[in-house]
Image: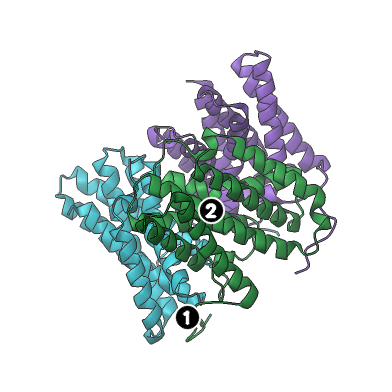
Chain colours: A green, B purple, C cyan
C-alpha cells in the first residue's frame, strides 16, 4: 500500500467519525448516519480527484473506503451516547482528519508533478471540503468560516511545510509527517489556546 | 432508446416538476423557475456521471433533457396556482422522481460493470443529490435530512433490491421495475403512514 | 493570449473582489479572504470545465488565476475599510464579473462546437455558480434567488445575444462584447431601476 492510500484510509476513518457525530446531533437514522459519514469522509478527496482530472475517483476504484465509512457510522450510531461531549469529540476528530487529509491531498498532487501552487491548493481543498460539505448539509456554521480560528490557515501552513520539506529532499514519509504535524499543531493550538490570525473587523456590515 | 435513457427522461420530468414547485414557493420569475428545475432535474445524474468518469455528462451529450426541464418549468409557472397544495404535490413528485432516478443511477453503474457497493451508491447519489441541491439552494431543510422519514434509506433499499434482482438473472426491465417500486413503496409508506427507522435520539445536542 | 483566456482573467479579478468583500462582511482572516476569493473567482469556470469534460480545469493548468485571486484578496483585506458601502460595491463587482464570466463560458462552449442550448447553459453556469457558491458558503441569500431582480435572466439574455451575434458572423471580439454588454445592461438596470420579470406570486407558500 502506498503512503497516499494509507493517508486516504486514515482520513476516511476520522472524517467518517466526525460526520457520524454531526448526524447524531441532527438525530438521523442509521442510513442517514452512513450518508453523512460517507459525504464527509470522501468529499474532499473526490473534489481533489475531479479537479486533477484523475481517471478514477479514489473510492470508485476501491470501494473499501465506503465500507469503512459505513462501519464507522454504525459503530457511532450505537455508541455515541457514551461520549461525554459529542461536539467536542467532533471538533477534535475533525482536526485529526483535516491534518491527515491535507497530507493526502498534497501527496496526490506531488505524485502528479503539479506546480507548488496547485500542490498547496489540493492540500487545502482535500482537507477543507469534506468538513465543509458536512456542515452545509447539516446546516451548521462551517468550521472553515468560524472567525478567530485557524482552519484553512492551518491546512495551508501544513501544505507549504510539505513543499519545503520536499525541496529539502526529505523522504516521503517525513514530508507527509511534517505536513500533518504542522496542520494539527496549528489547528489544535487554535482550539486549545485560541491561536488565531488577525481578522478583518474594522467595521461590521450594516445590514 | 435504452431503458437507462428512458429512466433518465422520466426522472428529469418529475424532478423538474418538483424543482419548479420549489421555485413557486420562493416566488421566482420564469428564468428562476427554469434554473431550479434544471438544477434539480439533472443534478443527481450529473454527479453520477462525474463520479463514474463517463466521457460525457448525459445532458451535455443530449440537450433534450434541458429543453424538457424548461418546458416543465414553464407549464408549472403558469399553472401552479391551480394546485391545491404545492408543498404536498412537491413531496409526491419528489418521491416519484427519487424512485425513477435511483433506477437510472443503478442502470448506468450496472452498464459500466461496477461492483455492488458502487452500484448501490450511484443509485442513492443519483436519487438524492438533485433534491438535495434544490433544497440547499432554495434554503429549505433537505428532505434527505428530515428525521423520522425514509429517504436515503428508501433509495438504498431500492438499489439493493435491484442488485438482488440482477443476481436472480431477471430481465433489465424487471430489475429497474423492482428497484423503482421498492424505493417508491418505502418512501410513500413513510409519507403516508409515517414508516421510519429508529433514529439516534438518546440525547439532543447541548447547544 | 486568446479572448477566452482574457475573459477568464478579467472575471477572476472581479469575482475575487466580490468574494473578498463577502469575506470582509463575515470578518474572516487573510487566509479566509483568499479562500472565499478563490472559490468565487474560479467556481463557475470549474463547473463549466467539469461539465464539458475538458482535459484540464483552467486554473489547474495555469495557476496564475489563483495567484491573482489571492493578490486581490490581500489588497481588499487591507483596504476594504476605505470603501463607503461594501455591500453596494460587492453588488456592482458581482454584476461586472457576471457579465464577463457569461462571455467566458459562452466562449469555451463555442470553441468546443457545442449546440446552442449547451452554449447558453454554459454561459449561465459559468456566470452564476461562482457567486452562488460564495453566497451559500457565506450563508447569505444567493443573489441568483433574490426575487424581483434579473440575474440568471440577464445571464441567459447575454448568452442568447452571443449565439445570435455568432449566427450573424460577427468577429469573436464583437460576439463576446455583445454578450457581456447585454448581460451587464440588464443586471445594472435591475440594480439601478429595479427592472424585473413578472414573478410567480399568485399565492405565498402556506408554511
Q: Is residue A203 above or below residue A5?
A: below
Q: Earlier in the sequence, mark 1 or mark 2?
A: 2
- Along the line of sight, the residue nearer the viewer: A62 or C35: A62
* Identity of the residue drawn at 47% across and 62% down: A158
> Horizontal and vertical percent for residue C160?
30, 49
Residue A192: x and y, percent? 64, 73
Subunit of label 2: A
Query: Extreme right residue here?
Result: B202
| Nearest to the observer: residue C100 or residue B197 | B197
Q: Nearer the viewer, mark 1 or mark 2?
A: 2
Q: Quadrant of residue B24?
A: bottom right
| Image quadrant in which the N terminus of chain C is located | bottom left
Q: Are marks 1 and 2 in contact (CB under 8 Å)?
A: no
Q: In this view of the protein, which residue sits in the foreground, A10 or B55?
A: A10
Left of A87 or right of it: where is C70? left
Left or right, residue B146 beside residue A169? right
Whether residue B58 is situated above or below residue C16 in the rendered picture: above
Circles 1 and 2 on the same chain? yes
Is residue B16 visible in the rendered image? The answer is yes
Q: Quadrant of the C terminus of chain C?
A: bottom right
Q: Secondary structure at mark 2?
A: helix
The residue wearing badge 2 is A101
For image coordinates 65% across by 57% down, the residue present is A138
Residue ID at (60%, 77%) = A194
* Crowdedness near tag 2: few (<14), some (14–19) or many (≥20) residues, C-alpha within 10 Å: many
The spot of residue B166 in percent (x, y) is 64, 18
Chain of the residue displaying label 1: A
Q: From mark 1 to mark 2, how far is it between C-alphas? A: 28 Å
Q: Looking at the image, which residue is at 53% across and 38% down?
A: A1
On the image, numbered disc 1 is attached to which residue?
A200
Amino acid at each position: 500500500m502506498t503512503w497516499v492510500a494509507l493517508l486516504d484510509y486514515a482520513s476516511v476513518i476520522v472524517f467518517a467519525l466526525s460526520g457520524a457525530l454531526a448526524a447524531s446531533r441532527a438525530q438521523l437514522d442509521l442510513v442517514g448516519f452512513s450518508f453523512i459519514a460517507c459525504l464527509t469522509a470522501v468529499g474532499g478527496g473526490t473534489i481533489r480527484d475531479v479537479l486533477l482530472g484523475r481517471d478514477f475517483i479514489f473510492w470508485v476504484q476501491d470501494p473499501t473506503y465506503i465500507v469503512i465509512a459505513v462501519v464507522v457510522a454504525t459503530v457511532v450510531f450505537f455508541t455515541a451516547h457514551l461520549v461525554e461531549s459529542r461536539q467536542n469529540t467532533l471538533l477534535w476528530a475533525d482536526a485529526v482528519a483535516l491534518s491527515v487529509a491535507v497530507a493526502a491531498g498534497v501527496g496526490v498532487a506531488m505524485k502528479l508533478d503539479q506546480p507548488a501552487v496547485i500542490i498547496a491548493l489540493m492540500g487545502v481543498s482535500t482537507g477543507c471540503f469534506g468538513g465543509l460539505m458536512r456542515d452545509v448539509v447539516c446546516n451548521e456554521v462551517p468550521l472553515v468560516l468560524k472567525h478567530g480560528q485557524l482552519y484553512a490557515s492551518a491546512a495551508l501552513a501544513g501544505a507549504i511545510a510539505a513543499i519545503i520539506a520536499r525541496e529539502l529532499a526529505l523522504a516521503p514519509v517525513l514530508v507527509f509527517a511534517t505536513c500533518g504535524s504542522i496542520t494539527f499543531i496549528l489547528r489544535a493550538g487554535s482550539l486549545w489556546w485560541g491561536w488565531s490570525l488577525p481578522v478583518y473587523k474594522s467595521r461590521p456590515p450594516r445590514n
